[in-house]
Amino acid sequence: MINQADISKALGVKIPVSSKMQTALREWEELYTNESSWIKGDTISLELASEISSETARLITNGGKSWISGSQRAEYLQEQYSNFMTHIRRDTEFACALGGIVFKPYLVGKQIKVDSITADRFLPVSFDSDGEITAAVFQERQTTEKNFYTRLEYHSLDTHSGIYTVLNRAFVSRDMWSLGRECSLQDVPQWSSYTPEMVIRDTERPLFAYFRMPAANNIDLNSPLGMSCYKKAAEEIRQADQHWERIMWEYQGSELAVMAQQSMFRIEKGKAAIPKGKHRLYDVLQGGDENFFKEFSPAIRDSSLFNGLNRILQRIEFNCDLAYGTISDPQTVEKTAEEVRSGKERSRSSMSEKQQALESALKHLIWSFNEYADYYRLAPAGKYETVFEWGEGVSVDRDKEFSRQLQLVTAGKLKAEKLLAWYFGCSEEKAKEYMPDSAPLFGGGN
């Protein structure tokens, strides 16, 4: 990771990311990549951080759908959007692990691509009163046999004038930790098409979307950065890894062994003849009682050790808003029915919040697509409508949800086309085509 002070000096901007937040990001990344300080010797990683991130991402995205419709412009946006959404679960997992991820569009010919930038590759510079990042620095690395090239891309929105500025600067260094001296973008073939400076006027929002985990940041209260989904369980993850090493040692230390004097074995070429494949079983002794023979076969305490591990895993589940039995043994969930129900409801509520955060980021991304389409005249102007339908990942009861929305329609609190759009997974304009021309749709008529 390049020194933050070097980046700040090179661009002439102040980066409000505290040392505590930088340390936390580094620790979360080490947990995710199984490189934490305690992973050494016989202690291996159970890969709990990556499993938690993966399962959380699955719960957020599983069965979810969204699409854009309404005009020729919408068709173009949908094409770009569908290409990006093919890897949304992977990107969501990265966001869960490191607290957030940036979706930054860029142009290739007439197609809009998206660079998914993890939290270790971007630095917020400023943000508004709602916590939305309005200026940020993004990092990209290219290496050769001798040099490390770094590209810094700085985005800044003046919220008063609506002027949006994008700067691209390239640097070269002999080591991976420093920024080095400034060089030309042309020195790196992959960056030769980048413009050193671009200014866009009348822009309302940044041309990148930040998907942030919704939990409050209690490491740096003034930071707009999100928190890892396993932040509250970091200590328990360490305990689980080390406890697993104790379980493995219990099996190794209680391995069956036979200790006997050499005189009790058949001698071949002056040595005790150990049966083939049994060298781990026999321990040949020299000297002492010629008739000494003893079997070593202690009882294994695996039940209590595994129970201890399972308790740690259940604590991790609680701290990560996962239902009991997600990573712990589901057959040993010693909880009352009410506790199990409460755990599932807590998980459902948490995943719903994360879905809403993802939806907000995706809407922002689609807005950015539309801005690109306007600026580069990629498709005819036109309105578009975005529809989201979250699936069964968080155990949504579809029948209950339909009944709830139907009651709202009957009471005149919800438009019927919104219910039909949700039920059939279509736009509201399409839903109106399903509605009858005269009689009321849902009761209330004579």
Image: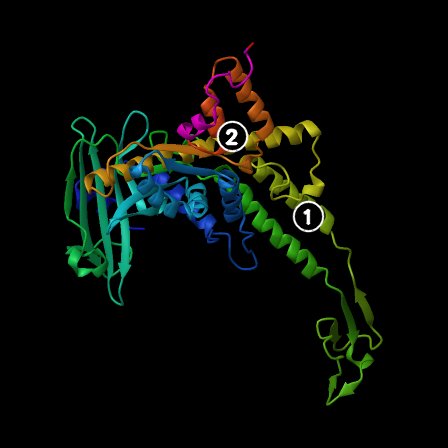
The residue singled out by tag 1 in the image is 306
Residue 17 visible: no
Gap in angstroms between the C-alphas marked 2 and 1? 46 Å
Main secondary-structure element of the magenta-colored stretch? loop
Q: Residues within 10 Å of mark 2 (few under 14, many from 20)?
A: some
Residue 14 is situated, as x and y percent measured from the top left of the image, at 22, 37
Residue 138 is situated, as x and y percent measured from the top left of the image, at 27, 45
Please name which of the two marks, 2 or 1, marks the residue nearer to the observer: 2
Relative to 198, is 265 on the left or the right? right
In the picture, which quadrant includes the C terminus?
top right
Mark 1 is on which residue type? Phe
The residue singled out by tag 2 in the image is 423
Against 445, is 259 above or below?
below
Residues rendered magenta in the picture? 428-445
Q: Nearer the viewer, residue 293 or 19?
A: 19
Residue 167 is situated, as x and y percent measured from the top left of the image, at 18, 44
Element carrying mark 1: helix
Q: Closer to the N terminus: mark 2 or mark 1?
A: 1
Relative to 179, is 75 on the left or the right? right
Q: Nearer the viewer, residue 429 or 124?
A: 429
Mark 2 is on which residue type? Tyr
Element carrying mark 2: helix
Is residue 444 a member of the stretch shown in magenta? yes
Q: Nearer the viewer, residue 34 or 348?
A: 348
Residue located at (16% from left, 49% from top): 195
Against 266, is 30 above or below?
above
Residue located at (74% from left, 77% from top): 286
Residue located at (15% from left, 39% from top): 199
